[in-house]
Image: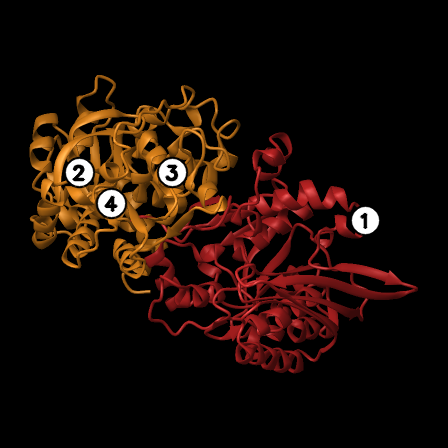
Amino acid sequence: MTADLTASCPVPLNDYAQVLLAHGGGGRLMDQLIAKMFVPAFANPLLAERHDGALINLDGRRLAFTTDSYVVRPLFFPGGDIGTLAINGTVNDLAMCGARPLYLSAGFIMEEGLSMETLWRVVQSMKRAAADAGIQIVTGDTKVVDKGKGDQLFINTAGIGRVEHERPISPAGIRPGDAVLLSGDIGRHGMAIMSVREGLQFESSIESDCAPLADLVLSLLNEGIEIHCLRDLTRGGLASALNEIAQSAGAQIDIDQNAVPVHEEVQGACEILGLDPLYVANEGRFVAYVPVSDADRALKTMRAQALGAEAAQIGMVVTGSPGLVTLKSQIGARRILDLLSSEQLPRIC
Amino acid sequence: MKYIDEYRDRVGAERFASAIARVTTRPWTIMEVCGGQTHAIVKFGIDELLPKEITLVHGPGCPVCVTPLELIDKAIEIATRPGVIFCSFGDMLRVPGSETDLLTVKANSGDVRIVYSPLDAVRIARDNPSREVVFFAVGFETTAPANAMAVFQADKQGLRNFSLLVSHVLVPPAMEAILASPRNCVQGFLAAGHVCTVMGFTEYGPIAEKYRVPIIVTGFEPLDILQGLYMCVQQLEQGRAEVENQYTRSVRREGNEAAQRLIREVFRVIPRKWRGVGQIPRSGFALSEKFADYDAERRFGVADYTAEESSECISGLILQGVKKPHECLAFGTRCTPEHPLGATMVSSEGACAAYYRYRRNKL
């Protein structure tokens, strides 16, 4: 069982004298780094929740606060760029707290020599994405590093949102019997990036799913859906999002592979590269945990909007082994759906 | 998705599973040779659909797993040298050598690049004439034609800064080594469909006959494997030992003859060491004399490396089908994908990694 193994067999940090790429990959190594270095060092109750953002009670007003840094290569990809990611990623973290996103900060770390035209294009798409998401960028920072000391452009955004409801949306709210709903098809962002990455260009029309999710979430709340927990899918894909929640909630989650929507082009590209779409990155999809009695209404609400048109129930929360995620395979046998140890690497044959 | 979904169909899988149950009257042990098949069996839970009389054991067909430790050390040594661009398929980067791995070399600012085709490495050599570009040519017969083509192209373009670190192994000699062992428990084989796509399956006739084992050339999707098992069990129950082809949509008896010609021109057959198994005669490729200048071991003077395996790791017994991953004391405790003791835990197609990833809760 995942949880037990992690507890009884900790990997000491000094096993890694250096930071490896996998420490930022959204898998097990990153999970260990956060749990063993950051959380204990900065220990406080809000951080201990390990939610997408912190929920702060400020003299009776509930605010959500979050931050994220964006490093992507290439800067522009089918369906978006680093600017749209920097807005939508932070907006989505706020949305996952059930908050209405309001204000963002933007920090730019630029490499000497970055073309002004490139920067302008990124700024323009941030402007459009901010308008689409209904937020304002109200403060910022600019730094330039020596040529060769950065990769063109890194962006950090932080965001504040207002919580307009009384529902405690967090992993602790999950109950056995909850339905697991997915807001749309998976894997498009990761495969769109891969299709234009150096050394791997392949012909495809896959576009990133990068999108702001706040409207979809707020519509569920307005509909009176009893949302127990939300989590957007990012680097580690659907499998990692499910595992994180199963572990924080101490619940078992059972998923049916046949219920998970994957577009044919994404499936095809994954087959060729030997990747599993369940672990491929997304930037505009989330999983919602709701009582099974609310599931149909929630799906109807999501499917009424373009972003949620392919929403589906993919599984259930069950009593079983806390922290475990299982998957019913396409041919009907059940197995563990694990966190990846590190990045998915395309295989030999 | 065409050619995928129909081979992962739930109803079809149940139909094959009950057909297998119908013809099975006693216990049989069947080995799937290829790591891709092992991965599919565990990932889709194919073995859970089978009658309890059928035992599947997992063969040596994972190229990452059987690449000997000293070759990983050679790769690390070459990749660390200044001026070298070391190109490899992604899954070799995590395999631990005696002291470190290629990912760590990369983190220490070695120029290690993941490529998706050996021809990408040739292009990198062309674009970087002042650098030495080395491609880690790992694999079975399946990847041999593309690797041969890379050398062929580099030679044609006069790229003297390109070389191959060759770790090529061949399936039929490994199957013979397993069958000839006194510990052998394998009664039938699913042969690797992709290997046979290149090489055909005429080589398997004499093995089936000599050792009295059915050999079914089998694909990689769940229904392929179930059908391969059905064909194998039918032969076993009827006392036949023949070579049959389940994977007809990809494999012809004579294989891909153009690819075989290219392989014969660029490579020669040599004895090779298999990690965990040991030396097997005539079981691998090295560059032929005509292309010996492209041999990275010669160019970098690393030919005489040796290395000792972890004494605790039983991957050799696992690769021969003698033991299963959970029968190892270190499995899931001292040996995990983050800290593998041996290669069957490193590669996603290694039997230990597959069991760890998909089966941990049931062991």
Q: Are marks 4 and 2 on the same chain?
A: yes
Query: Closer to the camera: disc 2 or disc 1?
Result: 2
Q: Position of residue B154 (x, y in %)?
A: 19, 55
Q: Supply the letter of whichever chain is orange.
A: B
Q: Which residue carries the number 4 mark? A: B164
Determine contact: label 2, label 1, CB under 8 Å. no
Say whether marks 2 and 3 touch (CB < 8 Å). Answer: no
Q: Which mark is residue B76?
A: 3
Secondary structure, mark 4, is strand
Tell me if mark 2 has few (under 14), some (14-19) or many (20+) residues whose alpha carbon lies within 10 angstroms of its own: many
Q: Nearer the viewer, mark 3 or mark 1?
A: 3
Marks 4 and 2: CB-CB under 8 Å? Answer: no
Q: Chain of mark 3?
A: B
Residue B254 placed where, x, y %?
A: 7, 49
Pointer 1: what residue? A45
Instruction: Check the rendered structure and report the hue given to chain A.
Output: red
